Amino acid sequence: MIGLDSLARLGRAGLALMAALGRSGVLFFQAVWGWPSGQGVKLWMRQVHFIGVLSLIIIVVSGLFIGMVLGLQGYSILVGFGAEQALGQMVALSLVRELAPVVAALLFAGRAGSAVTAEIGLMKATEQLSSMEMIGVDPMRRIIAPRLYAGFVAMPLLTAIFAAVGILGGMLVGVDWLGVDEGSYWGTMQATVDFRADVINGMIKSVIFGLVVTWIAVFQGYDLVPTSEGISRATTKTVVYSSLAVLGLDFILTALMFGRI
Amino acid sequence: MSQSAVSEEPLIKIRNLHFSRGSRKIFNGINLDVRRGQVTAVMGPSGTGKTTLLRLLGGQLKPDQGEIILAGEGDIGRMRRKALFRIRRQIGMLFQSGALFTDMTVFENVAFPLRVHTTLHERLLHDVVMMKLEAVGLRGAAALRPAELSGGMTRRVALARAIATDPQLMMYDEPFVGQDPISMGVLVQLVRRLNDALGLTSIVVSHDLAETMSIADYAYVIADGEVLAEGTPQALQQDPAPEVRQFIEGLPDGPVPFHYPAPPYRDELLGEVL
């Protein structure tokens, strides 16, 4: 019976999905309550360096180019209305509200998320996690928690750097190249970008994205089938699921934050 | 075996252990004792769940039914997470792959359990690590990284790490697999010597029959989820049961079939193509 078979397959897939969601929830809470005692800060700082500092180059370069493109596109639209002085406002609002949190999170998923998944996965495949357990050290505390907390902190910082570099990139093109008045570029920005409504909301987004991307990355690494194929699938899943989660969540958060305007 | 050793309560008592993976039954009511101060061997063909047994003993897997009593601590299968992590400090385990932490040097690998479980001063910690490395003959390799070690050396470093905190119980998962004759000889001697010198209790899970029998005080042969035979190595050598004889003499076919279950050969070759 083809109909029954596909129904059974659907049911099995649904059950597997529910079980995975359950496992990821348990992992999340165990890791959040599992700040490693003693060496916690040292382990956490090492991870902030690994997933934060080492992602800086890609974040800075992408931020610069996106800012420059915004400057160029914004100018070509605004100049038609004689409103090119508002370029600073346009570049800053696009970056602070949307592009910096979202693009930085997507880059973060590709650069740091996949690395975290592969690292944890390989630790599992080479029995390092098992041996740690047998030594009496909980990998949830030693391996998972520092990475989760590092992502939580690194993401908003990377987003802020992305936005700042982007605004400079926009200025480089708009002011230095296309001749928009420098005073207007910064003045309109200062007058219209609201700290609470724009900057804080953008940061809230980035904190949530950081948490979700790192959560997906550590869970995929911890839960994978410990074979080479399993690691490759889990790494791919990290990037795909993180990207979809970031874009979907961005819509929901934007609707909540700016939907009433 | 002395009379006092027999009367003493075993360090580990496994009773009526059942465990399955999916629909496949791995253990079907196993009883097994590990006596203090002895080297107990658990042997059997590949795929009989020897490694699974060690994972059950370490509490990394939970039995479906039955008890695993660690003397003075209770049933490992029913322990809470926190209690498990506490008792694991008294258990050392040597993994088949060594499972060294690849981001640390040999020295740091051996120092790892000491750093997390003790508050030894750095100077003292250094001396303890060096003593453990000396015991496995690798003091000179302290500064190397795991990637720079041969297979035999990796396993010896892992052994030094496993005994770093002086556990009561050592579990060896296929310690002799894939070793050249010299490394194998070294490891065989180490298992026995460490057991006696440090007053450990050891469980060696292996299918390397001659090596394991040469150092074991007591051995179990398991297959198909059950204990086929048990006794001292000398007694097992004399065991007349065909399953045991097949394993001990290394015969390709017998009660343990050479062929994986399959439909009749004739049908496969002459029947319809699937």
Image: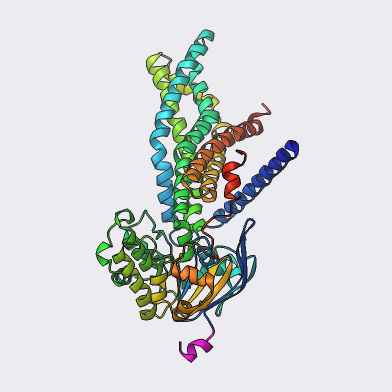
Residue positioned 36% across, 63% down in the render? B155
Which span is picked out in magenta? Answer: B1-9
Check the picture and name the quadrant holding the C terminus of chain B. Answer: top right
Residue positioned 36% across, 53% down in the render? B103
Please, is residue A122 above or below residue B246 in the view? above
Near-viewer residue (B49 or A116): B49
Is B7 one of the magenta-colored residues? yes
Is B186 one of the magenta-colored residues? no
Q: Is residue B151 left or right of residue B241?
A: left
Near-viewer residue (A125 or A93): A125
Q: Is residue B61 left or right of residue B46?
A: right
Residue A101 spot, x, y in % from top left: 52, 33
Residue positioned 38% across, 35% down in the render? A57
Near-viewer residue (B41 or B162): B41
Q: On the image, which quarter does residue B234 sit in?
A: bottom left
Residue A150 spot, x, y in % from top left: 47, 47
Is any part of residue A35 visible from this angle? no
Residue B44 spot, x, y in % from top left: 50, 67
Residue B139 spot, x, y in % from top left: 27, 67
Residue positioned 45% across, 87% down in the render? B1
Q: On the image, which quarter does residue A126 sit in?
A: bottom left
